[in-house]
Image: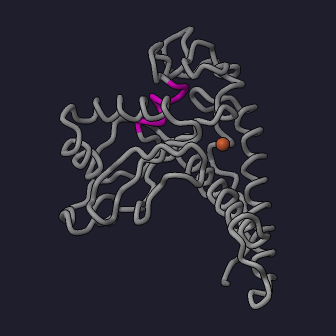
Amino acid sequence: MPWTELKTRRWPAFDKELDGISKETMEDHFKLYEGYAKKANECRKILKEFDYSEIEGNQVYSPLRAVSVDYTFALLGFKNHDLYFGHLGGDGGDPNGRFAEVIEDEYPGGIEMWQQAIRKAASAARGWVMVGYDLNDGSIFNYIMDTQNLWAVYNMCPILALDVYEHAYTRDYGATRLGSRQPAATPGRGGTPGRPAGAGGGEGSGPSLNRLAAFAGLPARRSDRPRTGPAGGSLSGLFEFR
Ligand SMILES: [Fe+2]
């Protein structure tokens, strides 16, 4: 198996004053990200060392089953956080380019309705929301994932990862996700004075979702290439990655 060692990255967001997420939360969160990388590497080592001619395959319990299942939890814990931390700290702003066009096609209320949809998805999820582009049909969907390795689908390419586990916001906002607390370390940053960014006060107005759902920092440059039709999506037709 051509696996190499997974390594965490100190994404630029760790060196910035983020709008709505404190440095304390980011540093604590980084430790979890490191833990996922460590355990995914540990699982890889074990999976490489198994003697597959001798090992038991048992659906009730077997080391092969346990490590294989938990490997996906650890690996996606690593991958999801890689995406999430990579998004943070951009300039923000509304979606644009081909992504905006696809959203306008899919949601009768356009970008505004998509933003409402992703906030509702975030309030309905227990772990993650992954905005994904389906390479089979070119559709965008907000995948609700109660844990990092559940309920994404094949041929979906993640575009925007929202971590809605409590560890991502409780220190700054409390446990309700309603954004009723001022973030602990956000003086001088944007938003309405006295209210944290993303604090809409209603259901699903999760912390920082305004900023995250605004596609913070993603390279959504307009592509001149046409969108591939229903028979197959094309990421290169959606974005031109820098
Ligand atoms: Fe997390």
Q: How is the image coloured?
A: one colour
Q: Say whether residue 242 is visible.
A: no
Q: Say whether residue 187 is visible.
A: yes
Q: Is residue 113 above or below residue 53?
A: above
Q: Is residue 99 above or below residue 65?
A: above
Q: Is residue 131 above or below residue 234?
A: above
Asked which quadrant contains residue 46, the reply is bottom right
Quadrant holding ligand 1?
A: top right
- Residue at coordinates 30% horizontally, 66% vertically from top-left? 136
Callout count: 0
**Image quadrant for the C terminus?**
bottom left
Q: Is residue 200 above or below residue 138?
A: above
- In depth, the one of 175 and 64 nearer the eye is 64
**Image quadrant for the N terminus?**
bottom right
Residue most extreme to the top: 194
- Residue at coordinates 35% horizontally, 28% vertically from top-left? 116
- In depth, the one of 163 and 74 nearer the eye is 74
- Residue at coordinates 45% horizontally, 28% vertically from top-left? 210
Query: What span is colored magenta in the figure?
Result: 206-214
Asked which quadrant contains residue 5, the reply is bottom right
- In depth, the one of 227 and 86 nearer the eye is 227
Residue 155: x and y, percent?
40, 65
- Residue at coordinates 60% horizontally, 32% vertically from top-left? 18
Q: Is residue 176 left or right of residue 97?
A: right
Residue 165: x and y, percent?
63, 36
Q: Is residue 232 left or right of residue 94?
A: left
Residue most extreme to the bottom: 53
Residue 92: x and y, percent?
44, 36
